[in-house]
Amino acid sequence: MELTTTARHPPGPEIVSRIVQAGTAACRLYGPSKTNVADIARLLGNSPARVYKIFPSKAAIWDAIAGNFLETSLRVPALAIGERGDAARCLEEAALGQLRLMSEARNGDAQMFSLVVLAAEGSWPSFIQYLKGLEADVGKLIRAGVTSGEFAPCNVDLAASCFCASVISLWDPRLIGAPSTADKISAHALVSFAVAGLRNYPG
């Protein structure tokens, strides 16, 4: 099934938000595999046909629901850079914060966590955008560190991509809690290693 978030009629943000919120509630009640558009429409007090006037497919609705959850519940707010020499600490806190949010969702919001696992497995637009957003946030922190002298001069975009790739096991919902040969390495040790590499990064 091809994923698209293009609506048949340009909807207002209020109705889109209502559908996403109803879809989130339905997903938590029934799970992503058992929820259908009729369930969402019933919570809205509308017909499925009305919902399909806003979204062209069930896949598009699910992508919007996953995207909203990823951005509102699974993304650490941008950390402000304080005094000179603060970027490394902020980057470390942000990386570990992402793991904390993922772990909390996995343990406390299982149905929605299952939905974002599906989004990751299917490379849904919402998940791709989510990863791009995390990389952009990391880039901002690296750029601040380069400016302050904490990190070595580098191609910031490339350094951000490398950093994210090195800690992806802490951020990918498919890998959270999965047995791994890396289990002997603590999250803090992995993030500290990745941050330390930016101090002498040759790129």
Image: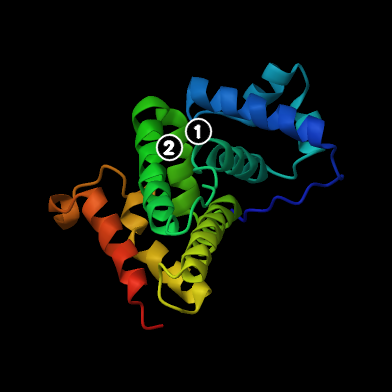
Label number found at residue 114: 2
Verify CB contact (< 8 Å) between mark 1 and mark 2.
Answer: yes
Q: Residue at x 48, y 39 (%)?
A: 115
Could you tell whether 148 is left or right of 180 in the image?
Answer: right
Place of residue 158 in the rendered image (x, y in percent of width and height, measured from the top left): 47, 75
Front residue of 17/165: it is 165
Quick one: SS at disc 2? helix
Number of labels in the image equals 2
Front residue of 140/40: it is 140
Q: Residue at x 70, y 50 (%)?
A: 5
Could you tell whether 3 is left or right of 79 in the image?
Answer: right
Q: Residue at x 43, y 55 (%)?
A: 86
Front residue of 107/155: it is 155
Quick one: SS at disc 1? loop
Label number found at residue 179: none
Mark 1 or mark 2: which is in front?
2
Furthest toward the front, the residue is 83
Of the image marks 1 and 2, the number of the one nearer the N terminus: 1
Q: How is the image coloured?
A: rainbow
Place of residue 147 in the rendered image (x, y in percent of width and height, measured from the top left): 52, 69
- Using the image, determine if residue 121 lies above or below residue 76: below
User: Looking at the picture, which amino acid does disc 2 mark?
Assistant: Ser
Could you tell whether 196 is left or right of 31 in the image?
Answer: left
Q: Quadrant of residue 114?
A: top left
Could you tell whether 169 is left or right of 181 in the image?
Answer: right
Label 1 to label 2: alpha-carbon separation: 7 Å
Q: Quadrant of residue 194?
A: bottom left
The residue pinned by badge 1 equals 32
